Image: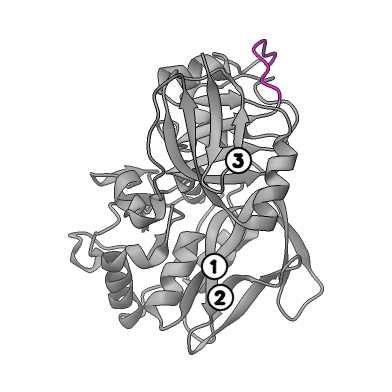
Amino acid sequence: MQNKLILKSGEIIQGRSFGAPISSSGEVVFATGMVGYPEALTDPSFRGQILVLTSPMIGNYGIPSKEHWESDKIQIAGLVVCNYIDTPSHHASKETLGKWLKRFNIPALEIKGTRDLAQKLRTHGVILGKIICGKNNINFEDPNTRNLVAEVSTKEIWTEGEGKKSIVVIDCGVKLNIVRQLAKRGLKVVVVPWDTDVMKLPFPFSAVVISNGPGDPTKVHTTILNVKKILTKKIPIFGICLGNQIIALASGGTTYKLKFGHRSQNQPCVLTSTNKCYLTTQNHGFAIKKVPKDFREWFYNANDLTNEGIIHKSLPFMSVQFHPESSPGPLDTDWVFDCFLKKAKINTKK
């Protein structure tokens, strides 16, 4: 059986299938993390993307139970690795990566030279591609033309934690560790669909968090309009990743698509006007271009100087482009949650 990755730029890369024997298309992106593939593959921010992992061995510690995932299923459109290990060794492993991918009907290829492919994506920029298994050819599809947030967001309101004070999380593709981090601080976390007008919720809440998520932030018009209402009422609000871009757009800022995005666990972010630099986990293809009025830059990327967060000059509005909850990745910026809750005047406990 012929198995290959075809790029819209013309390249054809032969490979060995170890996932589901189906064909799939999407945007080909790369991530450089050495660990954390179960968390990455279940991160809704990867929706519609064929993920190329540059780490030389993938699968060597298997797949843990569901409570360690970042959503309830695999979110990627396809997986490409250099060396797939089918004999995992780890105390938390419940199944092999290959069996897991087949169970969720996700194709995967083992190819030679994933780092060469990553270098091409860095030079050219992200490229549309498709994984072809056998004779099941399909067309190229650009996932950024869809409202990916609507695809991954919860359809019903759900809660986590037993705290006396409630905080609302607008689910644009939330990583579950964001919810865990808030709940462990003694809060009742109420997760609502992406298009929820939180001003109409029938219960009191102390603050709002806008989660991470996939795709172009300008596609979520309803969320942007609803966030404008929250800002007008001066309710404390905190954005993460896509949430950072949504707050910027709702406040009059602008966003743009990066050439190849930030998808790694070692992105260096500098706290503006200081000499402090933090290692961060990131997964995004868009960024803030124009910082909105009455906000200032909070963090910037030490590699390419792109914006990594904004904070209002006087009100409890703030957001970060990176993932302070990590999972996977460094724990350097866990303090950002506490910073927000302090500004929101919410007393919590860890």
> For the residue labelled by badge 1, is the local secondary structure a helix, a strand or a loop?
strand
Residue 86 magenta-highlighted: yes
Horizontal arrangement in the rendering, residue 152 relative to residue 118 (left or right): left
Q: CA distance from mark 2 to mark 3?
A: 39 Å
Q: To which quarter of the image does residue 64 belong?
A: top right
Q: Residues within 10 Å of mark 3 (few under 14, many from 20)?
A: few
Q: Which residues are magenta?
A: 83-90
In x, y percent, where is residue 240? 50, 60
- Residue 203 against residue 253 in the figure, above or below: above
SS at circle 2: strand
* Magenta segment, prevailing SS (helix, strand or loop): loop
Residue underneath mark 1: 287
Where residue 292 appears, as percent x and y from the top left, is 48, 84
* Image marks 1 and 3: residues in contact by CB distance under 8 Å: no
- Using the image, determine if residue 11 lies above or below residue 319: above
The numbered dot on residue 11 is 3
* Residue at 51% over, 86% down: 314
User: In the displayed structure, would residue 270 be above or below residue 121?
Assistant: below
Label 2 belongs to which residue? 310
